[in-house]
Amino acid sequence: MTESAPGGRPGDAVLDEVFGDRRDRAERYVELLAEEGITWGLIGPREADRLWQRHVLNSAAVESLIGEGCSVLDVGSGAGLPGIPLALARPDLQITLLEPLQRRVEFLELAVGTLQLDDQVRVHRGRAEDYPAEGGEPADVVTNRAVAPLPRLLNWCWPLVAPGGEVLAIKGAGAAAEVTKATKALRSMKLAAEVLVARAHPQAESTTVVRVRRSS
């Protein structure tokens, strides 16, 4: 794939297909990650040249697994990954970014305001364990990216899933081994997990996702 700065930017055709008329906002988001995101310590300096592929398109790939009009809760959203790329790629989704750390919350609020996503995305400061007690509503889809090992992650996230909903966890190359290791925990919770591979675009790098649903 031919890329150019900033952040390893893909070609216009790729960005148009993934983000449509929100392409400019996706580019502004990458600028925020490269500037405030790095300055505030949310993104490592070495990530500056691969923000598009490793972070933004990696996150946007999950949109192909989510049904139309779903509510999405992004747990441990950090710099807004995957929640903000999902919002930019899918205007039909209603997304809540859940993050406990104040500095990250301030960045998320800055990004949501700057990208004019206020009608679609809300930011909630808090922990997953406390979210229901704070009035948080269950979501059709609970997303997360590099938050915790699967058993611990599900203890946090599954109580936040609406009936018939699912968890979509972005994982690395060891996803299958992690699912196998979590077999006992999954059975005890009556859950089933599968490892999926998604791409935001045929020219984008693949994203490994663990989908967890109630077992039949």
Image (tube, rainbow, N blue to C red):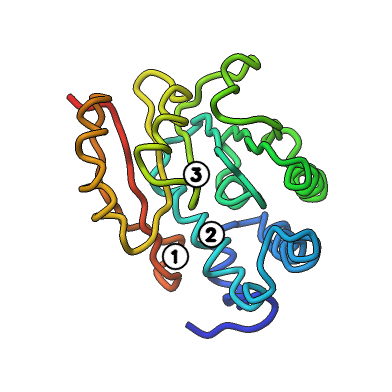
- Residue 95: image quadrant is top right
How would you rate the neighbour count of disc 3 (Cα within 10 Å): few for under 14, some for 14-19, many for 20 or more? many
Which callout, 3 or 2, points at the residue further toward the start of the chain? 2
CA separation, marks 2 and 1? 7 Å
> CA–CA distance between discs 3 and 1?
20 Å
Q: Secondary structure at mark 2?
A: helix
Amino acid found under the numbered disc labelled 3: Asn
According to the picture, the residue beneath numbered tag 2 turns out to be 18
Point out residue 168 in the picture as x, y percentages from the top left corner. 40, 42
> Marks 3 and 2: which is nearer the front?
3
Which is closer to the viewer, label 3 or label 1?
3
Q: Of label 2 and label 1, which has the lower sequence position?
A: 2
Residue at 43% across, 20% down: 162
Residue at 79%, 59% (x, y): give it.
40
Element type where label 1 sits in the image: loop
Say if mark 3 contacts mark 1, CB within 8 Å: no
Left or right: 183 in relation to 6: left
Residue at 45% of width from left, 70% of height from top?
Answer: 204
Q: Nearer the viewer, residue 102 or 169?
A: 102
SS type, badge 3: strand
| Residue 178, x across and y down, in percent | 29, 51
> How many residues crowd mark 1 within 10 Å: few (<14), some (14–19), many (20+)?
some
Q: Is residue 27 above or below residue 149?
A: below
- Judging by the rendered image, the residue that carries numbered circle 3 is 144
